[in-house]
Amino acid sequence: MRLLDRHIGRTVITTSLIVLCVLLALFTFMTFLAELKMVGRGHYGYLQALIYVLMAIPGLCYQLMPIAALLGGLIGLGMMANQNELTVIRAAGVSRARIIQSVMQAALVLVALGFVMGQWLAPRSEVLAQNKRAEALGEQPTLQTRSGLWYRDADSFVHIRSMESVDRLVGIDIYVLDGHHHLREYRHAAVATYRKGSWALHDVLRRTLEDEGVHEEQVDGMAWNTTIEPDLLDVVAVRPESMAIWELYDYLDFLHANGLDAGRHELAFWRQILTPVTTLVMVMLSIPFVFGSLRSVSLGQRVMVGALLGISFYLLDQMSGYVGLVYDLSPLLCALAPSLVFLVMAWALLRRGT
């Protein structure tokens, strides 16, 4: 049975990885074309755009793994069916349940590979790519960290803890230095808003270092003269979908503690957790089409079936997410719903084929 597991596993994993490479090439090319509109701005050239796109590949691997697993399972098992390998295996006394077990073991390998790419490589490469991109596009260096965004603004260093949107910032710390690089003033603002071409700080705690001591005052609002613009914040912001699970968990604690809207980040958090489950469901969904009525169809037809299922899943996943955010539904339920629908579909098709 180990030989059978290795043969089926090697077939499913190999075809899935080939499909993943094809999808990565397609999506990477599309991302590069989208980046071309930024070329020529600041120091951002074709080489910088290419580097940015290549550093986004680990994140794409994690996002595309369920679709690659579905297509890989359809193609790999379909090839075995067309070559009568599955028929010979069944004739040797191997049950369909045992074949399904071998396929799901291969799926676990794909899940592990996707988890490493999505939770270890992708967050680091995404942050580094965004930092390099923002530095090339903007005039001041920026640094995106787990605790927020840092950047230098003339004689000040600014830390932004969170962005509700590009024109509304939360948790701003401003450190103002003198000509000898000594701290001269510190400001903390609960919120900063961008209106009519200028920034304003709200609920500001201001501490000024003077010869006689530290002078502290609390003001409701004040103007903020800074060189950073909303479009640069949009460039440097790391999407919640690109953050690791533990980073999202810490960030959600901050959002909840400050009474901020955490809907999008909660949805991304549960999607990250459920992506391995989705991969397993997609591989399971490919099995009925091999043992069922599509067992003798051509490779092109299998690819078409897989593509249609993948597109359907993507549309359902996006629709459930947007509906959940608009109507304030449970992020867990919205993230789980597409996988449940396809799991029920896979189970019904397997039952029908028995």
Image (tube, helix red, strand yellow):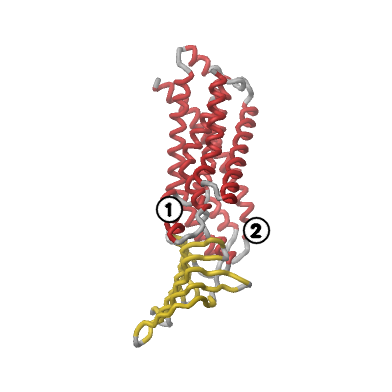
State the residue in front, 150 or 325.
325
* Mark 1 Cα shell of 10 Å, populated few (<14), some (14-19), many (≥20): some
Residue 300 circle label: none
Residue 165, compared with residue 228, is above or below; it is above
Three-letter code for the amino acid on which mark 2 is drawn: Lys
Position of 128 with respect to 301 (left or right) is left
Q: Hey, which residue is sitting farthest bottom in the picture?
A: 212
Q: Disc 2 versus disc 1: distance between alpha carbons?
A: 31 Å
Residue at mark 1: 247
Q: Position of residue 35 (x, y in %)?
A: 61, 55
Q: Is residue 28 visible?
A: no
Q: Is residue 323 above or below residue 48?
A: above
Residue 225 image point, x, y percent: 54, 76
Q: Position of residue 146 (x, y in %)?
A: 43, 58
Which percent across, then down, holds residue 126?
49, 54
Relative to 306, does residue 201 appear above or below in the rendering? Answer: below
Task: Identify the mark nearer the N-term, 2 or 1.
Answer: 2
Which quarter shows the C terminus?
A: top right
Amino acid, disc 1: Glu
* Residue occupying the point 43% across, 53% down: 247
Quick one: label 2, few (<14), some, or many (20+) residues within 10 Å?
Answer: few
Q: Are marks 2 and 1 in contact (CB under 8 Å)?
A: no
| Label 1: which secondary element | helix
Residue at 56% over, 73% down: 199
Q: Nearer the viewer, residue 167 or 87?
A: 167
Q: Residue at x 51, y 33 (%)?
A: 281
The correct choice, above or below, for 69 with respect to 230 in the image is above
